[in-house]
Structure formats: C-alpha cells, structure tokens
Image: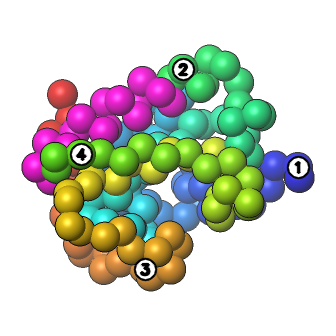
Amino acid sequence: MAYDQNNIFAKILRGEAPCFKVYEDDMTLSFMDVMPQAEGHTLVIPKYPAENIYDLDAEYAGAMAKTVKKIAAAVKLAFNAPGILVAQLNGAAAGQTVFHIHTHIIPRSQGIDLKLHAREIADFEELKKNAEKIRAAIQ
C-alpha cells in the first residue's frame, strides 16, 4: 500500500486536524490518542511519510525512539503508573488502523484491563487535562 497523504496523522502534521499535543521537536510529534485504551494513552509519530517501520527512514526511527523514551518516562510519572506498555503495530493484520507509523505509550496497572483499540472517543476536556499533566512531567 502506498502512503496516504490524507491519513489523520498526516493531516495533524500539516495542521489540518487538531490534536492534544504533548511534545514536538524537529522530527517527531507526540499527542493524546483520542480513542485511548487507558487514561494517559499517548502516541508518538515521526514527521516523515512512512506507513510502517519498513518505510521509515533510519534517522527518523532513531528520533522516534528517543521521543518514545522521553514521553514514556513522563507518562509513567504523570499517571503514577507502575508499568508502561509501548506498542508499535505494522499492518492491518497486526492491528494498525492509521497507516502512518506511530508508537503507543499506555500506562499500566495490575487489575485494570485495557479498553479495545480504536473503539471509543474520549472526552476532549479529559484529553486536554491529561496532555497538560504529561507536558508538566517531561524532563
């Protein structure tokens, strides 16, 4: 499949669609997942038109990994999470629903089940507050 310039993440990168931004640098963007599997579910994307890991430029892959590490630490702190799930899906068969490479950062606690992926849109005021909590925890 060829990269779709009209996918929602490409639109977010171009400023054509809104997001609840957590962090941005020259090569990456992090924002709240609007269909979170748990409170604090955050995404990291590269500013590179890659559908999946196989299409991603190595320099952007490195930048993405660096941002994932920074944001995972902030999410863990902001939500006092004992664990963090980091997931990156490649292809529909793996569960990828937006075909711009992205990494999920999800705070985890024992006994709290994850919601189903890409099923229910969260309250935007809650997402805004969660983004603020994570931004405040970035070190």
- Residue 99: x and y in percent read 70, 55
Q: What percent of the width, then of the height, locates residue 21?
A: 36, 52
For the residues labelled 4 and 3, the Cα–Cα distance comes to 24 Å
Kindly check if marks 4 and 1 are in contact, taking CB atoms under 8 A apart as contact.
no
80 relative to 72 in the view: left or right: left
* Mark 3 or mark 1, earlier in chain: 1
Up the image or down, 30 lies above or below 53; here it is below
Residue at the limit of the structure toward the left, as seen here: 80
Where does the image place residue 11, in percent across and percent down from the top left? 63, 58
* Of marks 4 and 1, the one in the foreground: 4
- Residue at 69% x, 36% y is 53
The residue that label 3 is drawn on is 121
Tell whether 114 sits left or right of 52. left
Q: Which residue is mark 2?
A: 62
- Front-lying residue, 116 or 25: 116
Q: Considering the numbered disc 2 on the image, is that residue within a helix, a strand or a loop?
A: helix
> Which amino acid type is shown beneath numbered disc 1?
Ala
Q: Which residues are magenta?
A: 64-80
Disc 3 or 2, which lies upstream in sequence?
2
Between discs 2 and 1, the one toward the N terminus: 1
Residue designated by label 1: 2
The quadrant holding residue 67 is top left
Amino acid carrying label 4: it is Gly
| Disc nearer the start of the sequence (4/1) | 1
**Cα distance in 3D space between marks 4 and 2:** 23 Å
Residue picked out by circle 4: 83
